[in-house]
Amino acid sequence: MSNKFSLKATSETLRAFSETYVRPNVLARDKAQKLDIDILEQLASAGLLGLEVPEPYFTRDDNCLFDSALPFSGSVLTIQEISRVDPGVSVYLHVHNILFNKLLLQFGSEEQKHQWLPKVATDVTGAFAVTEPQAGSDLSLMTTSATKVEGGYEISGEKTWITNAKEAGVMVLIANVAQSCGREVATAFLLDTNLPGVTIGERLSKMSVRASSTCPVVLNKVFVSDSAVLGTPNQGVDIANYGLCVGRIGIAAQMLGLSEGALELATNYSNERHAFKDKIVNFQGVAFPLAQLSAEISVLKPFIYQAAKKIELGYSATQVMDDANKAKLLASQLAERASSCAVETLGGNGVAEQYAVEKLYRDAKVGKIYEGTVNILLRSIASRALCN
C-alpha cells in the first residue's frame, strides 16, 4: 500500500474535493457554528471518515476518493488540504481520524476494532475526551474517576472543550481508576455516548474553528463493561501521550494548510488589485512578506511529513514527541503570521467576511492553544534540548 501512496496525487485529489464540496459553504458554516448535514454526508461518502481503516473493517465503494487505507501521512495530508479552505471542517476530521480511529487501530483489541471501526469509517463520529474544567495542560489534576464494579466500571466526572462532542457516537475517554494501594492510575475507555448517564452539553460559542462542535461532557455513574477498556487498565497515560503526539502532527498540518490558504488568497488578490497604475504584487512592500511566507511554508512542510513518516515506521510517541512539538509550535506561529499578513495585504477588504482571510485569521489563533499551548511546547522542547 505504501508503494502506491503518492503525496502529489493524493494532494490533487483532496484539493479537488475541497474546492468542490468544502469551499461553497465556508461562511455559512462559520456563521451557523455547526457542520451542515451536506458536508457531513460528503465526508462520509468520500471515505474520509475511515482514512486509515483497512479491510475487512471498511469496504470502500466507487464514491470513495481512495480505494484502500491511507498511511498516517495520508491523514496528515487530508488535514492540510482541507485546512486550506476550512479549518473548521479539518479539525472535525482530525479528531475523528487521528485522535479516535488511530488510537483504536493502535491500542484496540480485535473485538473492539470489529465493533467500532466499521461504524466510525462510515457514519459514526469519534471524539477524544481528556480535558477537564481544572485539568488542561496539567492532566495530573484530572478528577474524572472510574470505579471498578462487577463486570466493569462506573465512570463519573466532567470533561470540557471536547471537539466533535455534539456529533460523537463514541469517544476515547481517560479516567482515573483507584488501585488497592490507594494510588490512582489513568485508564482509557471506549465510551458509547448513548449510554445512560452521559450528557453532552451545549456547544461553546468560539472565536476559532466555529463550525466544529466543542462541548462539555458530563458523566453520572456511567456503567461500561470490562471490554470497553482500551489497551490495558493502566495504560491511560501512554495512550493519551500517543494521542498528543500524533495529534500535534495533525494540528501542525492544519496550521500549515491554513497558512497555504492565506498565502493563496493574498497572492491572488495582490495580482488582481491595482494601485498607482500597477498590480500591488509588483510593490516590494507587498511581495516580500508573501515571499517570506512562501519560503517558510516550503521549509516547514517536509519537517511535518518527516515526523508523520516516523509514526508510520513504528517509532514510539516518546521518540517522535520532540519533532511533533517543534512542528506544531512553528506551524501555529506561521499560521498566525500568514493570516495576519493576508489581512493586511487585502487592506480594508481583509476584515470583510466575504474575502475569507478574516476567518483564517480567527482560526489561526487556536492553533497556538489546543493540543499543547506554545508555552507547554517550549517547555518540552527546552527540557530535551537545553537541560542535562
Image: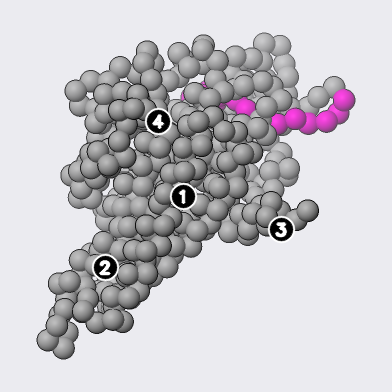
Circle 3 sits on which residue?
386
Q: CA distance from mark 4 to mark 1?
A: 17 Å
Task: Decide if residue 196 is in sight here.
Answer: no
- The stretch in magenta equals 181-195
Q: Residue at 45% across / 19% down in the picture?
A: 116
Q: Earlier in the sequence, mark 2 or mark 4?
A: 4
Q: Earlier in the sequence, mark 4 or mark 1?
A: 4
- Name the foreground residue: 17 vs 40: 17
Q: Which amino acid type corresponds to the residue marked 3 in the rendered image?
A: Leu
Horizontal side, residue 208 vs residue 134: left or right: left
Residue 67 position in % (x across, y down)? 26, 24
Q: CA distance from mark 1 to mark 2?
A: 24 Å
Q: Which amino acid type corresponds to the residue marked 1 in the rendered image?
A: Phe
Main secondary structure along the magenta-highlighted residues: strand
Query: Which one is in front in this view, the residue at disc 2 or the one at disc 4?
Result: 4
Q: Are marks 2 and 3 in contact (CB under 8 Å)?
A: no
Quarter holding the N terminus is top left
Look at the numbered disc 1 and give the secondary structure of its residue.
helix
Query: Which one is in front in this view, the residue at disc 4 or the one at disc 1?
Result: 1
Q: Which amino acid type corresponds to the residue marked 4 in the rendered image?
A: Pro
Q: Residue at 78% across / 27% down in the picture?
A: 178
Circle 2 sits on which residue?
266
Residue 300 position in % (x across, y down)? 43, 55
Quick one: which residue is furthest to the right in this view? 181
Look at the numbered disc 4 and give the secondary structure of its residue.
loop
Q: Earlier in the sequence, mark 1 or mark 2?
A: 2
